[in-house]
């Protein structure tokens, strides 16, 4: 499974891709089992210390049928979708100059490819869940910890789960954030998005400006 990727939109910096995955941890996890595409949605942790591209760690219910296929040989991809927004040509100064413009959609996405393996180990799962919880509870005023729950209850819950670990064999980032537009159009897009004020628009406005600075600096 590959993604159509124009060179202008490719993001190759591993640290940027990992940061995106951490900011948008709920991935679409896709495997092909006996010719059938199987899709799950789950949060993943990123471990940058493994290999060239890092590794993903997650968990699924023990009764999820996909577990029977995760033997370290089956190819899979985890898709991390970030901010995405409709872009109106009305934001382009060039549209008002000559009218040669059409709408588009901006987005940022990362595809992490690998061959996941199942981990059926209670200690591994406990450590994984403690790390995952600590990461996502860090913004709470009173962070919840796994140890807050009764030990016997936690053990029963963990017994219902299995872990997934996937060393990343390739990491592909696509930042379609108006890099192909003239400088004035990029500024117009960023201003238009900022005026909308919603979270996705504000995040995309920042990505557009970051790409614009990078592009202008390379010229």
Image (cartoon, rainbow, N blue to C red):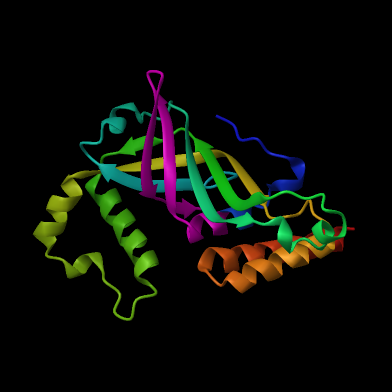
Q: Residue at point 56% right, 47% down?
A: 110
Can residue 48 be seen here? The reply is: no
Q: Residue at position x 34%, y 70% from top? A: 137
Frontmost residue, 95 versus 65: 95
Q: Is residue 147 left or right of residue 95?
A: left
- The residues colored magenta run 18-47
Q: Is residue 156 above or below residue 193?
A: above
Left or right placement of residue 200 versus residue 163 in this view = right
Magenta stretch: dominant secondary structure: strand
Counting from the top left corner in percent of width and height, residue 12 is at 68, 48
| Residue 185 within the segment the image draws in magenta | no
| Front-most of residues 189 and 10 | 189
Judge from the rendering whether residue 144 lies leftward or rightward of residue 136; answer left or right: left
Q: Quadrant of the C terminus?
A: bottom right
Q: Is residue 156 left or right of residue 143?
A: left
Q: How many marks?
A: 0
Q: x and y percent of residue 51 in the render? A: 56, 44
Please give the name of the residue rendered at 61% of the width and 42% of the height, measured from the top-left corner: 172
Percent from the top left, x then y, of residue 207? 66, 62
Q: Position of residue 104 (x, y in %)?
A: 66, 49
Residue ranking furthest to the right: 219
Residue at left offset 40%, top offset 42%: 165
Q: List the single residue furthest toward the left.
A: 152
As for residue 35 lying within the magenta part, the answer is: yes
Residue that sits furthest to the bottom in the current view: 141
The N terminus: image quadrant: top right
Q: Nearer the viewer, residue 83 or 157?
A: 83
Question: Viewer-proximal residue, 210 or 194?
Answer: 194
Q: Is residue 193 above or below residue 12?
A: below
């Amino acid at each position: 499974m590959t993604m159509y990727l124009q060179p202008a939109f490719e993001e190759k910096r591993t640290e940027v891709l990992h940061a995106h995955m951490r900011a948008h941890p709920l991935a679409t996890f896709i495997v092909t089992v006996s010719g059938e595409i199987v899709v799950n949605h789950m949060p993943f942790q990123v471990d940058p210390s493994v290999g060239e591209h890092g590794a993903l760690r997650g968990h699924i219910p023990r009764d999820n049928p996909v577990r029977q296929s995760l033997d370290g040989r089956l190819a899979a991809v985890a898709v991390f979708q970030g901010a995405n927004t409709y872009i109106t040509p009305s934001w382009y100064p060039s549209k008002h100059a000559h009218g040669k413009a059409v709408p588009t959609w901006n987005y940022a996405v990362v595809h992490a490819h690998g061959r996941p393996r199942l981990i059926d180990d209670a200690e591994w799962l406990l450590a994984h869940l403690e790390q995952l919880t600590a990461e996502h509870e860090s913004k709470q005023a009173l962070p919840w910890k796994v140890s807050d729950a009764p030990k016997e209850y936690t053990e029963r819950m963990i017994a219902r789960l299995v872990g997934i670990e996937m060393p990343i064999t390739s990491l592909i980032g696509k930042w379609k954030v108006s890099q192909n537009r003239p400088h004035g159009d990029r500024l117009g897009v960023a201003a238009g998005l900022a005026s909308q004020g919603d979270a996705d628009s504000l995040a995309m406005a920042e990505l557009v400006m970051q790409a614009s600075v990078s592009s202008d600096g390379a010229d």
